[in-house]
Amino acid sequence: MKNILFIASEAVPFIKTGGLADVAGTLPKYFDKEKYDVRVMIPNYRCIPQHYKEQMRFITSFYMDLAWRSQYVGVLEMEYDGVHFYFIDNEYYFDGFKPYGYIHEDIEKFAFFSKAALSALPLIGFRPEIVHCHDWQTGLIPVYMRERFQQDSFFWNMRSIMTIHNLKFQGIWDVKAVRDITGLPASYFTPDKLEAFGDANYLKGGIVYADKVTTVSASYAEEIKTGFYGEKLDGLMRARSNDLWGIVNGIDYEEFNPETDKRIVQNYNQTTFRKEKVKNKLALQKELGLEVDAGKFMIGIVSRLTDQKGFDLIAYVMDELCAWDVQLVVLGTGEERYENMFRHFDWKYNNRVSANIYYSEDMSHKIYASCDAFLMPSLFEPCGLSQLMSLRYGTVPIVRETGGLKDTVEPYNEYESTGTGFSFANYNAHEMLGIVNYAKSIYYNKKREWNKMVDRGMLKDFSWGSSAEKYQELYDSL
Ligand code: ADP
Ligand code: GLC
């Protein structure tokens, strides 16, 4: 039996701001349970819903040094859906209505979390052979392991993996402050270690010190070795390319299943979608005050509203996009200018644009189930889960050919009748508009072809099975 511990800043169902939570919370379910005991550790944020908190069991508590500070660390645990979760408790750091806020606070919060996670290991009755860290919030873990914990025999031979879900976010702050927070010696803040362009960089530390580095699709693993996608760490990615694996994400096929999903009005599957799927559209049109019309081409967007996701392209051609024969349903929060843009168009084209500027699991499922197409023109996309959810629900993705989008959506070829979606290559608003219009023409003029594409998409398997096998291979290689 191999023991693995995921350490992350979010995991479903407890706390989620993006795809990282889906991965950290559901991938552990899909390992071979005879051979791998994969558990998860996250912070015990105040904003985790109360009904989960009531199920947590207290394991232990102690005080820990963080440079000159001495801080309380509580450890709680619970089983959820067959997975063992640990929660690091500290009311001062994990207070607030959301997990992240101001970067200078987050820098100290996640230094605390990283050191507390390692400090807790000898006390929880579970010794991982591998600690599997996710994103910059846990970047200091491989660093602390090397700097101090591995002097203790409990940590001898313990390995670390750093998974990059998004290279854009690195946890950057000034060296002096980070030294004061972490207590790490000055020798760690050099350009071959934690320092990058004059600042301290948590993710860089993780990438330098981890035994293996992974990211969430094969294409993104290649892209981040280049200047355009490398977020100034492309040199480091090239240097570590022998240890860099690209393993594509999956989604939880139990949670995202149009046949059993309780959040949608009408269940359907790959054989019944032609008749049944549209009932979800009709219900959503009614709910959102759109014109009720089964035949209208409905495009969905469920996303963080940021530049990463290509919203500047959408903004550029918003008027043309919202043509008379299109309905656009948006669910998302993020940058104010995009929130307001969608609100404005909702007002302007009230019966065909619906802006839902909030976060809702229920509404997201309804949109995946109801729409005909799903738009995701990302500037970069490490993997992307929304397009996988769309495919699962028979909603045809329209994406830009980058990162995981390129690896998971096969472009439609009308001559060979192949493909599961539509894609375009260049980050150009009119190229995007062109492909949306092309999709629309197939939808309106070649409905049989469209339905065959839906069919092919629903047949694809993006459950966690094969990705989990790759992670197992990775664990075995250490
Ligand atoms: P990222 O992690 O970069 O945000 P992903 O596509 O990997 O992108 O994952 C996004 C996840 O967050 C998906 O599960 C998507 O359904 C969900 N999501 C994004 N915005 C919202 C929202 N406003 N309401 C509900 N779910 C959302
Ligand atoms: C990040 C990426 C997204 C990926 C997710 C889970 O948030 O932006 O592309 O799917 O992590 O790995």
Image: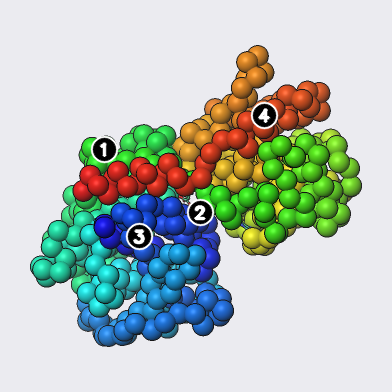
Q: Which residue is mark 1?
A: 241
Is 349 or 210 nearer to us in this picture?
210
Q: Position of residue 430 (x, y in %)?
A: 66, 29
Earlier residue among tags 4 and 2: 2
Q: Residue at x 29, y 45 (%)?
A: 474
Label 2 SS = helix
* Residue 147, visible in the rendered structure: no
> Which quarter of the rendered picture does the N terminus lie within?
bottom left
Label 1 vs 2, first from the N-terminus: 2
Which label lies toward us, 1 or 3?
3
Is the CB atom of the residue marked by disc 2 within 8 angstroms of ligand 1's nearest atom? yes
Placement of 170 over or under 275, stated as above or below: below
Of mark 1 and mark 3, the one earlier in the sequence is 3
Mark 3: secondary structure: strand
**Residue found at x 56% / y 76%:** 49
Q: Is residue 335 left or right of residue 159?
A: right
* C-alpha span from label 4 to label 2: 26 Å
Q: Is mark 3 within 8 Å of ligand 2?
A: no
| Mark 1 crowd level (few <14, some 14–19, many ≥20, 10 Å Cα) | some
Residue flagged by tag 4: what amino acid is it? Met
What residue sits right under mark 2 in the picture? 19
Q: Earlier in the sequence, mark 2 or mark 3?
A: 2
Q: Is mark 4 within 8 Å of ligand 1?
A: no
Mark 4 residue element: helix
Q: Name the residue that disc number 3 marks.
A: 38
First in residue order: circle 3 vs circle 4: 3
Amino acid type for the residue under numbered disc 1:
Ser
Eye-nearest disc, 4 or 2: 4
Residue carrying label 4: 453
